[in-house]
Amino acid sequence: MLEPWAFAHKRWKKIPYLHLCELPSLKRAAAVIATSGSEAQGLKRWFKPEQIWVLPLGVAEAPAPDYNTARAALNWSRDERVVVFLSRLHEKKGLHVLIAAWRRILPLVSFPVRLVIVGEGDTSYVEPLKRETGRMSDAKIDWVGPQWGDKKWPWLQGADCFCLPSFSENFGLVVPEALLVGTPVVTTPGTPWADLGRGLPVTIVEPEEAALADALVRVLRAGAISPEIRAETHTALVAGFGWSRLAKDYVALYQSLATASR
């Protein structure tokens, strides 16, 4: 909630609450964990440098890519390219930008494409978007509803691209989850993946409809990702963000705090 975009949103009520209720406790914290360098930079406004520890979030190391099985289960045809958005349906997540970009994409591709929206949100935000997509008669746009826990994996495994056009994220856990199953990602500078995602198939683009449409068209025209490349992406993601690697860093932090408090 201390990210610049989030803090600016309805700041009239957040500023007094922060100063009256939250900061007195937060400033006494022995450590504040930032999940990326960009988040740490934003936290410097509120905390001393020695309070801030940069530790990415970890992900479970399963499941593995399983593109064909997921496609068959979801009844997606082999010749169509599928973009999946899976998140809370909120203005911050940029779904309205993705839908506007999708209208631009349709005349630019010569193969079938499908946009799948997985999640739930406030009806005041979601219903106007559903009405807008209902008027796009030439587009395949599926509103799936919430699919959390293990139910989310087929949607990520079967996608040709995962898109999260957020204006602000401290980490965006669903991004590494998509990469875990080998699916390339298009996201924005509002997430930290420009610096976290080096060596992984992550495209960073501004959350603007023209720029987003261009990026998605490039990814979709590249065609289906081979099983070998999906497996390589899975291996690279686990090596960088699997809990088997990161757990020791969290243990070291907690041990140092426990030692300092004695």
Image (cartoon, grey):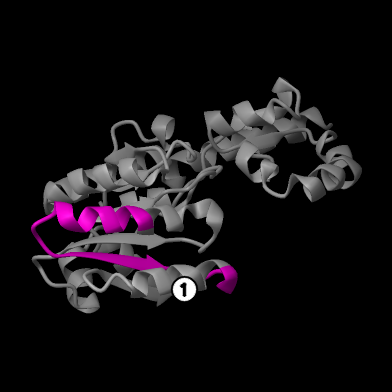
Say which element carries label 1: loop
Q: Let me know if residue 115 is in the magenta part.
A: yes
**Residue under pointer 1:** 146
Q: Position of residue 192 (x, y in %)?
A: 47, 36
Residue at (51% x, 63% y) in the render: 89
Q: Position of residue 1 (x, y in %)?
A: 68, 46
Q: Position of residue 84 (x, y in %)?
A: 32, 61
Q: Residues within 10 Å of mark 1 (few under 14, many from 20)?
A: some
In the picture, the quarter occupied by the C terminus is: top right
Q: Let me know if residue 111 is in the magenta part.
A: yes
Residue at (86% x, 41% y) in the render: 25
Left or right of residue 46, residue 111 in this image: left
Left or right of residue 24, residue 219 in this image: left
Q: Quadrant of residue 76?
A: bottom left
Seen as rendered, the residue at the extreme top is 49
Q: Is residue 95 above or below residue 165?
A: below
Q: Is residue 115 above or below residue 37?
A: below
**Observer-nearest of 84 and 110:** 110
Q: What is the tally of numbered marks visible in this picture?
A: 1
Q: Position of residue 63 (x, y in %)?
A: 32, 61
Residue at (85% x, 34% y) in the render: 28
Q: Amino acid at mark 1?
A: Pro
* Magenta-tinted stretch: 100-124
